[in-house]
């Protein structure tokens, strides 16, 4: 019988469970997907009830498996998602989608009363992203859904809600509150006073290594408070590198470049160019560049395959054509992506007329994505430092074309591909190592 840590790893697309043994090797995993449902405004959102039931059943199955002795559970989820509970601890609203439109203009007074958009965004390390700022989500609920809001007793970020399912304790963690929430003052490293002024009380964040001993199906299990997935994914590399400077590229729907070694304060220039700060589970600033480039890649795959009459997974089987990479870099054309922050996430099929083959079109798309990634890395690198080591986690670490572009666009860098395929889950497991 193996002692194991279970990690529930919830992405926007895939919902997974991993079991890690005492060597932190994965000894079991399972994954599923859930169809989205509609929230009370008719906008797509996660089916949280079905996800909850799946999680509870998965943990029960692990406990009933004689091969494993469950010692601890932790959680890793995407950010920008809140769960609202009433006084009885019941969930009273959908898990609103962070892509749901929210007009920042409706919050002009809020920003002005807190120093203006630029200064408030700098202090909270949170560009004015609308629903991606969970603090704005709270205000939206206050303003637009007062009948629901009057019954709100507790507010939890997504990872802490999954922890709550087992512990029934209201918690917060540094990685979640530090992830572009507009609730955390990075100058003072504490909650921003606007929350108190708005009569919003959030739990104090706890060290990510602390767990709550909980009885689950008759067994005592240590339950962690959960982590924001991007912040969790940097934990294994911090442990492995032992203080050596690096940047982590966390690649998925978002491509996030994270530099935990930046000591410079976030600047207004960085902020207006998609930079922000995350936090580690131990309250350390992580300077980051966050771009929705994985989503852009995703939306182009199907129309590209249909236009050139190839399989949708054709990109997975393209050989590396270094000559084509260098040729497109020399041309430096800008076709798919706009200057600055991209806001159009629908494929523009009219652009395909510029290409004679699927290969050239795909290589051009990856060139433009890579170029923005390098710009993001440069932005979060302190002026007196030159970081050479780039770790890549997530789906793009298998993309040879992407990796080749990075090395061609930024001379002297060393790209390291993590042997671990599930850094965010491993990071959450490592936080529970004292309970194995």
Image: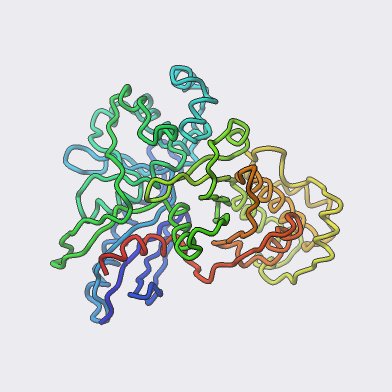
Is residue 265 positioned above or below 221 on the image? above
Instruction: Report the residue at 25% width, 78% height from top.
Output: 65
Q: In which quarter of the image is residue 149?
A: top left
In the image, is 393 to the left or to the right of 349? left
The x and y percentages for residue 252 are 55, 56
The x and y percentages for residue 135 are 40, 33
- Colouring chosen for the image of the structure: rainbow
Q: How many marks?
A: 0
The x and y percentages for residue 40 are 37, 38
Q: In which quarter of the image is the N terminus?
A: bottom left
In the image, is 424 to the left or to the right of 66? right
In the image, is 89 to the left or to the right of 353? left
Q: In which quarter of the image is the C terminus?
A: bottom left
Residue that protrudes farthest toward the front in the picture: 384
Q: Which of 185 and 45 is in front in this view?
A: 185
Q: In which quarter of the image is residue 51?
A: bottom left
Instruction: Report the residue at 79% width, 45% height from top.
Output: 334
In the image, is 25 to the left or to the right of 294? left
Instruction: Report the residue at 80% width, 66% height from top.
Output: 322
The x and y percentages for residue 168 are 19, 50
Q: In which quarter of the image is residue 340?
A: top right
Q: Nearer the viewer, residue 436 or 90?
A: 436
């Amino acid at each position: 019988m193996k002692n194991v840590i279970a990690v529930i790893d919830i992405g926007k697309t895939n919902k997974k469970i991993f079991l890690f043994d005492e060597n932190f090797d994965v000894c079991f995993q399972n994954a599923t997907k859930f169809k989205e449902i509609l929230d009370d405004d008719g906008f797509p959102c996660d089916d949280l009830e079905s996800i909850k039931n799946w999680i509870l059943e998965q943990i029960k199955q692990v406990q009933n498996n004689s091969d494993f002795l469950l010692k601890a559970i932790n959680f890793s989820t995407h950010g920008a998602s809140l769960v609202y509970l009433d006084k009885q601890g019941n969930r009273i609203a959908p898990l609103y989608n962070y892509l749901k439109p929210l007009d920042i203009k409706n919050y002009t007074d809020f920003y002005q009363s807190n120093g203006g958009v630029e200064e408030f965004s700098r202090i909270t390390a949170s560009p004015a992203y609308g629903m991606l700022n969970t603090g704005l989500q709270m205000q939206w609920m206050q303003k637009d859904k007062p009948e629901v809001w009057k019954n709100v007793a507790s507010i939890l970020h997504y990872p802490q809600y999954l922890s709550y399912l087992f512990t029934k304790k209201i918690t917060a963690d540094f990685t979640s509150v530090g992830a572009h929430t507009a609730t955390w003052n990075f100058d003072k490293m504490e909650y921003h006073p606007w929350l108190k002024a708005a009569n919003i009380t959030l739990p104090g964040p706890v060290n990510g290594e602390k767990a709550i001993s909980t009885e689950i199906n008759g067994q005592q299990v240590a339950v962690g408070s959960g982590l924001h997935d991007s912040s969790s994914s940097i934990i294994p590399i911090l442990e492995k590198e032992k203080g050596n400077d690096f940047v982590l590229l966390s690649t998925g729907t978002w491509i996030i470049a994270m530099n935990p070694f930046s000591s410079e304060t976030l600047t207004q220039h960085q902020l207006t160019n998609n930079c922000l700060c995350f936090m580690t589970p131990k309250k350390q600033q992580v300077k980051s560049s966050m771009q929705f480039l994985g989503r852009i890649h995703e939306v182009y795959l199907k129309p590209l395959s249909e236009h050139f009459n190839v399989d949708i997974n054709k990109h997975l089987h393209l050989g590396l054509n270094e000559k084509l990479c260098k040729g497109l870099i020399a041309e430096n054309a800008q076709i798919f992506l706009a200057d600055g922050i991209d806001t159009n996430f629908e494929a523009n099929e009219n652009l395909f007329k510029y290409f004679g083959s699927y290969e050239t079109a795909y290589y051009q798309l990856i060139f433009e994505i890579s170029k923005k990634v390098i710009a993001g890395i440069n932005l979060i690198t302190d002026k007196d430092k030159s970081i050479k080591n780039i770790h890549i986690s997530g789906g793009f670490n298998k993309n040879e074309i992407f990796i080749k572009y990075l090395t061609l666009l930024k001379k002297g860098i060393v790209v390291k591909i993590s042997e671990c395929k599930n850094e965010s889950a491993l990071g959450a497991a490592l936080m529970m190592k004292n309970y194995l």
